[in-house]
Amino acid sequence: MSVAATRGISLNGLEGEIINIEVDVTHGLPSYQLLGLPDAALNEARDRIRSAIGNSGKRWPQTKITVSLSPAWLPKSGSGFDLAISIAILSATQQISELDLNETIFIGELSLEGLLRPVRGLLPMLLAAEKHGMRRAVVPEANLSEAQSVSRLEIIPASSLVQVLAIICGAEMPRQIPLITYENESPNFDFAEVAGQEDAKRGLEIAATGGHHILMMGPPGTGKTMLAERLPTILPPLNDDQLRDVAAIHSIAGTTQLASILRRTPPFVAPHHTTTSAGMVGGGTKMIRPGACSLSHHGVLFIDEAPECAHGILDALRQPLESGSIEITRAVGTTRFPARFILVLAANPCPCGRFSGKGRSCQCSSLQVRRYLNRLSGPLLDRIDVKLRVDNPTRAELASNDPRESSEEMRRRVESARAIARERFAGLGFELNSAIPSEFLRRKFRADSKAMSMLHILIEREEITARGFHKILRLAWTIADLRGVSIPGVDEVEAALALRTETSQ
């Protein structure tokens, strides 16, 4: 009997740690002992592995088996270690020849009949393995689409333990695999389907260009949700770095959006207004998982009926709105997820939704209206750049057969304006106008003198906050880029100020 070792990987958020899996098989009463702070899923691996080995034509040793997962101080969770443990056991019992597997990691869950099942979080695991100098990875075939995003690793897909053994013991290793290519699908939604709402479309285009947050307020049925669902169609496709970050988050969460994200489509996440704080920002006990704000990273987070959210849910977004990330601390440790998204809030003007000043029969008292709108806190609203009033389209707009502007046309303008900003910010560590640091707005990226004087007067009158001052300047830069103006002037600053206060007019 002998000792054998393989490599696996453990995740903490998006960060991964290489785990050395050592198996010692010695004479003694038949037993199986797992060391290294395993969770319940790992402790249950013994029965899965024993059945998988037996049903793959190999023998489960009737001896004392000790499995050590090191570093021992790091908690391990999940069923992704099944394959690595089974290979180590078969190697220790000399049922397969001794192999040099120091630069190979094994990831996968085994079924009782020895099939290799997909695991969550494969992409961040592979990115961590690449970072730690691994050369190849054996992964479930069902995870191949996300695994191929890691170009520097030799990816070896397999569908069963029998196939893994054939690959690592035969001439097929390393094995070349064909790349799966993704075409940009035509979007299911298009702004050409929206009748009227020209002001709202313009506001959404500005928000998409600069990465600004939006509040849409209007009666029910005016198209707020319809507009929000089409915002991702005018966002540029994800670049390589964004694709890796977003796909890694969705891989951990196991969402159904992963396939569209691998096609470079920005994510669109719309949690119900009854969601919990953990559902919004992330949480968990044994394993911390990302929430809606991280799942919408580099995309859109849409919250319909925003004032109906429970107390504190929306305010939990205030910190990630500023920092672009979220840190979650639990007893098992602290996990950080990126969370740089465009927030879109939709709200009715009152509890019944009919308050508009256009003759609708609103039955709400002024106190009810005030209480309803006060559920959107002042500090949260101060972080919203674009506030849009959305009313019903007119009869003429609904009946018109004139061609409407498509999402493709709007996206071309967004991409052109973003290219201007990217060139302006080259080498500074950010690309969007919404990310301009405050100190840069006071020096390097000031508006012209008349526009700055106007903003300083508004601050002295306490009509805007210091945060509002910076938000208006960032928004003015976006408007200037769309207009082809080299530096924001009074017109751009006034337009930004109007967008920031539109719902109150």
Image (cartoon, rainbow, N blue to C red):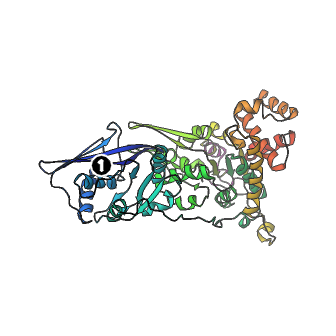
Q: Overall secondary structure of the magenta stretch? A: loop
Q: Classify the position of the C terminus by image quarter.
A: top right
Q: Which element is circle 1 on?
A: helix
Question: What is the three-letter code of the residue carrying label 1?
Answer: Ala
The residue at which mark 1 appears reads as 40
Task: Examine the structure image and report whether residue 302 is included in the region drawn in magenta.
Answer: no
Q: Position of residue 188 (x, y in %)?
A: 63, 67
Q: Position of residue 311 (x, y in %)?
A: 53, 42
Identify the residue at horizontal 53%, vertical 49% (top origin).
292
Q: Is residue 220 visible?
A: yes
Instruction: Place residue 377 in its image quadrant.
Output: top right
Q: Position of residue 124 (x, y in %)?
A: 48, 49
Identify the residue at horizontal 54%, vertical 63% (top origin).
179
Q: Position of 237 compared to 14: left or right?
A: right
Q: Position of 28 compared to 195: left or right?
A: left
Q: Is residue 103 above or below residue 262?
A: above
Identify the residue at horizontal 46%, vertical 57% (top origin).
155
Q: Position of 490 compared to 282: left or right?
A: right
Q: Local crowd at mark 1 within 10 Å, few (<14), some, or many (≥20)?
A: few
Q: Which residues are magenta?
A: 349-371
Instruction: Place residue 492 in its image quadrant.
Output: top right
Residue projecting furthest to the top: 460
Q: Position of residue 113 (x, y in %)?
A: 28, 66
Of 157 and 265, the residue lying toward us: 157
